[in-house]
Amino acid sequence: MSVNSAPRLQLSGITKRYASVVANDDVSLTVMPGEIHALLGENGAGKSTLVKIIYGSVKPDVGTIKFNGNAVQIRNPQEARELGISMVFQHFSLFDTLTVAENVWLGLDKKLKLQEVTQRINEKATEYGLDIDPQRPIHTLSVGQMQRVEIIRALLSAPQLLILDEPTSVLTPQAVEKLFAVLKKLAAQGCSILYISHKLHEIRKLCTACTVLRAGKVSGHCNPQTQSNASLSRMMIGTEPPTLKHNDVSKGGIRLQVHQLTLARDNQFGINLEQISLHVYAGEVVGIAGVSGNGQKELMYALSGEDTRADADAIRVFTHNAAHSVGKYTPTQRRALGLQFVPEERLGRGAVPNLSLAQNLLLTRFNAVGKYGWIRVNDLKNHASRIIANFKVKSSGANASAKSLSGGNLQKFIMGREIDAAPQFLIVSQPTWGVDVGAAAQIRAAILALRDAGCAVLVVSEELEELFEICDRLHVMANGRISPSIDRATASVSLIGEWMSGLWSNHETAVTEQAT
Amino acid sequence: MSLKLEARSQSSTLWTYASPLLALVITVVIGVCLFMLLGKDPVRGLQMFFWEPIRSGYAWGELMVKATPLLIIALGLAVCFRSNVWNIGAEGQFIMGALAAGAVALLADKDTSRAIVVVVMLAGILGGIVWACIVGMLRDKFNANEILVSLMLVYVADSLLGYMVNGPLKDPNGFNFPQSKTFEWVTQIPRLFSGSRMSIGLPIALALAAALWVFLFRTRAGFAQQVGGLAPAAARYAGFSSRKALWTALLISGGAAGLAGALEVAGPIGQLTPYVPAGYGFAAIIVAFVGRLHPVGMIFSAILMSMFYIGGELAQSRLGLPKSITGVFQGLLLFSLLACDTLLTYRVVWRIKPVQRAP
C-alpha cells in the first residue's frame, strides 16, 4: 500500500467501558485523505467519547488507531496536535478579555511574535474567506465569529485532520453556508474532516462518507448523499421519527402581552433588551428563533419572574376574568395565574441534580404540600410516579435522582411536571436541546396537544426545523430586539435566517401597525 | 502498576456513611504515631481519648455536658451550610449569647423566681441572634462576604466580653479579677440528676435535633431553604427567595449558638469570665460536617468531638501533654474527612497496565 492511498485515520475495534455503560463497543471507522466524513448519532450514542479518544483526552480500553497508515498511541491532546489533528469544540475555549490574536497566540509556539501571529491570522482569514479582525476583544464578537476564531486557530497548525463537534448549532442558516464553503475548500486541499452532527440534512449536503453510531456500536457506514433523511434516521435510531399532526384550532383570547419591554442587562456578558413586544393567544404556539445569546435568556428571565426588574405593565397576563400586570411578580405569583415555565438548563435550574424526582416536583408544584407547609411524602411520591408514567420517563422511579436520568428523560419529566399543572400559558426554552430523536418527537407532540387543548405556548429554540414543525407564528430575536411576527405558512428559512442577523427593517412598519 | 482515581457515575451511598468512620480510623492511626513521636505510650494515649470518657456513668455525664453545646450550635450551622450561607462565626454568637444571658442572670438575687431561667435562656438566644443579624445585614445590604464578617465578629465579641468583665460587670468584691460575681442559684439551668452536671440542655438539644429533622425533610420551607444551597439557579426558578433563606439560616444558627452560650454560662460555668469561649463555635463546624449536616449524624459527631475535648484535658493532666492536643485531633479529623470524601465521587483503581499497547 503506498503512502498516498493510506487512510488518514483508521480506527479498529475501539472499545471504551465506563463504570455502568459501554460508551464505544468495537467501533471501527476509516477517514480517507480529503474526505468529509460525518459521525452521526443521537445524544449518548458515543460520539463524544470516540472523538475524545481520537483527540487523546480519553484512552480506549481496547483497539488500535492508525494515522496515515502508522499505528499510533495518542496519549494527550498535545500529541494529537503534533500528529496533525485539530479540533473545534462545541463549547469554545476563548478568553473573553483578550483579543482574537492574543487568544490564538496562547495556543502557539511562544517564539512567535504577536505581530507575526496577527499577520498569519489575516492570511488564513483571506485565504478561506473567514472575515475577522485580529485586534478585537473576544467579548465583542458574536458566537459565529468566535467559532471562526476557533477554526482559524485550528487551521494555523496546518492540520491533516480537522474535527468539528456540532459546529452549526450556534450559526444562522447563512453562516452555515459560509462554513460549508470553507470546509469544502479545506477538503479539496487534502485536509480530512470529521464532522460530528445529528442534523441529517446538513450531513447529506456536506459529507461524502458517514459512520452512524447507535448505543455505542456502529450501526452503518454509508455515503449520505445517496441516502434519504428517513434512511439515515433509521440507521441512527432504528425507526423513522413519527410525523406530527397539526390540527386546526381556532385562536382563543389573548393570554400574554409583552409591550415595549426594555431592560438593561444585569451583568457584563448579558444583552440589553430593547422594546420587546409580542402577543400570545390561547390555542397557538408562538416561536422565537435566533442564535442563542441574542437576548432570549434575558427575555425568558423577565417572563418567568426570575428577573423582576421589568416595568409592571410591560408584561401582562390575561386570565378569563381579568388582566394582570405581572412585570414585578415573583415566579410563584405568576404560577398562581396559570403560567408555567420550562427553562433551557435542565440540571441546576429546571431540576436540582442531587434531589429525587419526587423532591424536584416541589420546585413548582404544591399538590402534596398541606397545612403549614407540611409535605405529605406519600402523596408526593405518587404524584411523581403518575407524571413518570404519563410522560413515559425512563427512570428507576420517583426516588431516582434527577442527575441519574438521561437528558431526554429529565426533559420529559420537567415538561411533564409543568404540563401536569394544566397551565393557561406555557413557556418552553429549547424544548429538545440534547434530547434524543424519540424523546424530542414526544415532547413536540405534547406541546401541540397542549395547544390543541387551548393553552397558549411560547417556544424559544435554536433549531429552525423544530420551530417550523410546531409553531403557528414566528418571531426572531437578534441583538436584544425582536422582529415582527410572521405566520409559519408565509415564512421561509432564508427569510428567518436574514432576520437572525437583525435585518427586518423592511418589515418595521408591520411592528408599528401591530402596536397601535 | 499504578493507583488511579476514577470518577463514579453516581456518588456512593455506602461512602456517605463509611467516609466519616474511615476518617476517624485515619485520625486514630495518626494519633498513635503522634503519641509515639512524643515518647508516650500510644495505648494509654488512646485510652485518654476513647476509653476514659465513657468508662463510668459520671464520665458519660461529663461527655454529654460538652456534647450539648456542640450539638446545639452544629444544628444551627447545618441549616446555614445546607443553604449555602457560610456562617463560621458561631463562636462570636455563642459569646454574645453567654454575655446577654450572664447580664440577665446577674440581675437576679436570692428571692428571684426560678422562672428567671427561661428569661436567661431567651436572653442568650436574643444575644446570638443580634450578632448574627449584623452578619445578615452586611451580606444583604452591602453584599459583604459572610465568611469574613462572621469570623471577624468573633473577635469583636471576644473583646466585648473582655471589656464587660473588666468593667461594668466586674465583681466589686472579686479582688480585681476580670470576672463577674458568681450567679445566684436561682439562675442555674436545672440539672437532670443530682451528682451529675448534665442539665436540661441535653433534652433540649435532642428535641432541637428532632425539630431540625422535621424542618429539613418534611416541610416546604425547609426544602426551599436547602434548594438555594444545592442549586441557586433552581431556587430562583422555583421562586424561593435567597434573602429569606439567608435570614432564616442566620436567625436559626445565631439563636442556637446564643442558646448554647446561655446554657453554658448559666450551667457548668456559673459566672462570666474571659474564659467562657472554649472554641465550641469552631468545633461545631467540624461536628456539623462530620455528622453530614444530618441531625442524627451530628448527635454522634458531637459526642465524638466532646471525647476529644475531655481526652485533651486528661492527656494534659495525666500524660503531661499540652492541652492543644484537642485542637490537633479536631483538625486531623476534619482533614481526614475532607480527604475521605473524595471516595464519595471517585473510586480507587489499581491498574496493572493502563492501555493495551497497539501491535
Image (tube, rainbow, N blue to C red):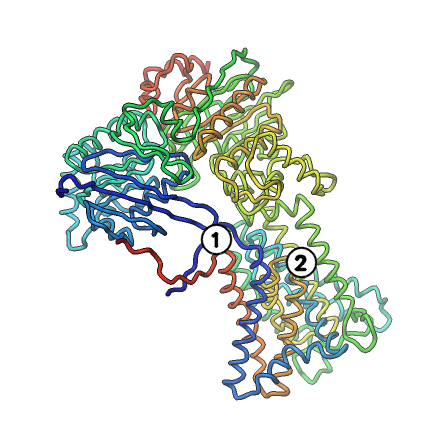
Give whichever of B101, A139 is nearer the camera.
A139
Amino acid on which disc 2 is placed: Pro
Mark 2–mark 1 CB contact (< 8 Å): no
Q: Give the distance between the C-alpha atoms of the residues marked 2 and 1, in whole angstroms.
A: 27 Å
Q: Can you identify the residue that label 1 sits on?
A: B8
Q: Is residue B129 visible?
A: no
Pair 2/1: label in front: 1
Is B288 placed above or below A227 here?
Answer: below
| Helix, strand or loop under label 2 | helix
Q: Is residue A414 visible?
A: yes
- Label 1 Cα neighbours within 10 Å, binned few <14 / some 14-19 / many ≥20: some
**Residue ID at (26%, 54%):** B359
Q: Position of residue A363 (x, y in %)?
A: 60, 39
Q: Position of residue B96 (x, y in %)?
A: 65, 65
Give whichever of A509, B112 is nearer the camera.
A509
* Disc 2 and disc 1 on one polypeptide chain: yes
Name the subunit of mark 1.
B
Q: Which sits earlier in the primary sequence, circle 2 or circle 1?
A: 1
Label drawn at residue B295: 2
Name the subunit of mark 2.
B
| Relative to B74, A266 lies left or right | left
